[in-house]
Amino acid sequence: AQKITQTQPGMFVQEKEAVTLDCTYDTSDPSYGLFWYKQPSSGEMIFLIYQGSYDQQNATEGRYSLNFQKARKSANLVISASQLGDSAMYFCAMSPYYGGSQGNLIFGKGTKLSVKP
Amino acid sequence: DAGVIQSPRHEVTEMGQEVTLRCKPISGHDYLFWYRQTMMRGLELLIYFNNNVPIDDSGMPEDRFSAKMPNASFSTLKIQPSEPRDSAVYFCASTATGAGEQYFGPGTRLTVT
């Protein structure tokens, strides 16, 4: 069965510094997709970044990058130059499909990031 | 373009009452998902549809829960009778085949007293 583990319930980071949020996953399937979502206090789920299991390069989207280490089954999110607006819950998720999310997304428990001014 | 639309945004009801949550997916998306978020269990899938057909309903808690998708632009999640343990945020999400991420609606916060 697929599983996502986020071991950091909460983290603090100083404004303008970089922060890494950890995510490990477990699957026996060679095809899968990894996602990160942000959930601010207002409650909506905001997609941040995607990495497919066959993608050779780490995904990047603006200040977000995904440190994908396939052999270690880790997909850590790196946020550079943290901003106060980055304070939120962050969820790592896995789809059983490469290139899309048409199946069930398995979510981790989340990491609460607090950015200090 | 409008995103996923959910209604109502908040619902407070008494135990035993019927509750209906509504969702309009993004136009052109052929997959629709219903998730539930609680502090104890996190985000979990309840059911999902492909081309209006239920594909996996293994996450539906029990017979009190039912979901329908009568057409490509509308889905409902019904709880009858509701119980206090059903209190949660219910999200609807949609995506298209091979399109990438799931797009989430704003959620419905349900409180059952």
Image (cartoon, coloured by chain):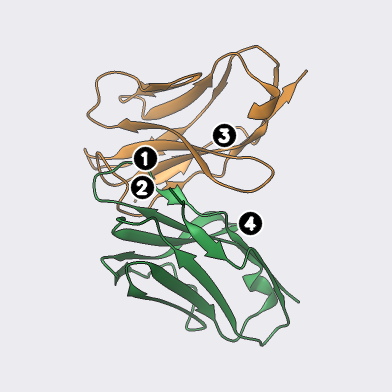
Residue labelled with disc 2:
A2
Spot occupied by residue A60 in the image (x, y as percentages of width and height): 40, 20
Question: Pointers 1 and 2 in contact (CB under 8 A)?
Answer: yes
Separation of disc 1 and disc 4 at Cα? 21 Å
Q: Quadrant of residue A114?
A: top right
Characterize the local packing of mark 2: few (<14), some (14-19) or many (20 or more) Cα atoms within 10 angstroms. Answer: some
Separation of disc 2 and disc 4 at Cα? 19 Å
Amino acid at dot 1 = Asp
Residue labelled with disc 3:
A7
Chain B colour is: green
Q: On screen, A43 above or below B21?
A: above
Q: In which quarter of the image is residue A85?
A: top right
Separation of disc 3 and disc 4 at Cα? 16 Å
**Left or right: where A40 falls relative to A93:** right
Amino acid at dot 3 = Thr
| Residue at image coords 28%, 59% | B30
Chain A colour is: orange
Q: On screen, A105 above or below A47?
A: below
Residue labelled with disc 1:
A26
Question: Pointers 3 and 4 in contact (CB under 8 A)?
Answer: no
Amino acid at dot 2 = Gln
Q: Going from the N terminus, do you reach mark 2 or mark 3 first?
A: 2
**Left or right: where B49 falls relative to B91:** left
Separation of disc 3 and disc 1 at Cα? 14 Å
Separation of disc 2 and disc 3 at Cα? 16 Å
Spot occupied by residue B13 in the image (x, y as percentages of width and height): 71, 78
Residue labelled with disc 4:
B40
Q: Going from the N terminus, do you reach mark 3 or mark 1 first?
A: 3
Separation of disc 1 and disc 2 at Cα? 5 Å
| Helix, strand or loop under label 2 | loop
Q: Nearer the viewer, residue A75 or B76?
A: B76
